[in-house]
Amino acid sequence: MFTGSMVAIVTPFDREGRFDEETYRKLIEFQIENGTDAIIPCGTTGESATVDYEEHDRIIQVCIEQVAKRVPVIAGTGSNSTAEAIEISLHAKEMGADAVLLVSPYYNKPTQEGLYQHYKALAEKVALPQILYNVPGRTGMNMEASTTIRLAEFPNVVAIKEASGNVTQSGEILAAAGDKIDILSGDDFLTLPLMACGAKGVISVSANIVPRQVKAMVSAAAEGRWEEARKLHLRLLDLHQAMFIESNPVPVKTSLALMGMIEPHVRLPLVQMQPGTLEKLKGVLKKHELI
């Protein structure tokens, strides 16, 4: 249902730490102009963990308004409280989101059965296409392939953003339920290997700064132009890695700031980049002629 190069878009803040709506709208236009296939507000890269409820709604609303149905808007509405995730997801539906992205419950560390029941409740109560989001590095636990395969039986569970780093796990899902649920890469540096196994695209961090290049690589893979896709993948590999030399979204927001597109502000407990990693980041950006 959702394929191609999809961006987990940053949330720009002004000098006072407030949501910078004007800049956000410009970032959305930059993405659409460069071929991005879907916009994902309020994901990890959008600093959803440090925006309050009112801001969360406003960010999604502005995204929906600015996109104006040109591409799908997939709202990040996950929570470690099932009731809260349902409430936020229903509100996103009211505002006109095309789908929701649902991160696995963090901190609680539920069992696999708890994970299943969490997503089952969302599938039954929220009549929107739903993308599961498995990111053990952020949540403290892995959603096993067997759990994803069970959840694929719900018709509105259409995909999973796999950011476990485990290509075998994604392969197990595709082998058992690839006709019922799509895999979307959650790690830019694994997009090509996962697409070679049958994934349908990526929810990308790097696309914030190089949307055209990420789109080109994903399109080449989707169309079976594997040699071209491999070259593009390897060309971008150091850039993908640079986006994680400190905690996401600090490097990507810093990159956008160096490119003159946003202010570099993040919210505590995130802080601006340290001098050593900042110089490394600048070196990669210069190599790719972004600054």
Image (cartoon, rainbow, N blue to C red):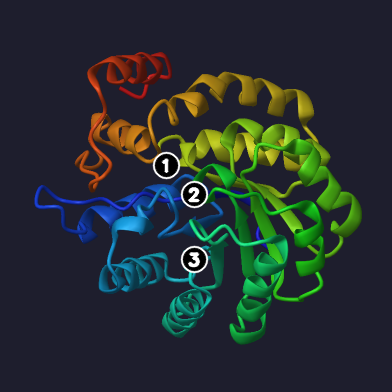
Q: CA distance from mark 2 to mark 1?
A: 6 Å
Q: CA distance from mark 1 to mark 3?
A: 26 Å
Front in this rendered view, residue 168 or 100: 168
Q: Left of 88 or right of it: where is 116?
A: right
Q: Which residue is mark 3?
A: 80
For discs 3 and 2, the disc positioned in front in the rendered view: 3
Coordinates of residue 254 in the picture (x, y in percent): 28, 33
Quadrant in which residue 62 is drawn? bottom left
**Residue depicted at x 19% and y 41%:** 263
Q: Check contact, mark 1 vs mark 3: CB within 8 A.
A: no
Q: Which residue is mark 1?
A: 208
Residue 79 to residue 10: above or below: below
Q: Secondary structure at mark 3?
A: loop
Residue 7 marker: 2
Q: CA distance from mark 3 to mark 2?
A: 23 Å
Coordinates of residue 280 in the picture (x, y in percent): 35, 15
**Residue depicted at x 28% and y 20%:** 278
Q: First in sequence: mark 2 or mark 1?
A: 2
Q: Left of 199 or right of it: where is 67?
A: left
Q: Is residue 194 visible?
A: yes
Q: First in sequence: mark 1 or mark 3?
A: 3
Q: Secondary structure at mark 2?
A: strand
Q: Residues within 10 Å of mark 2 (few under 14, many from 20)?
A: many
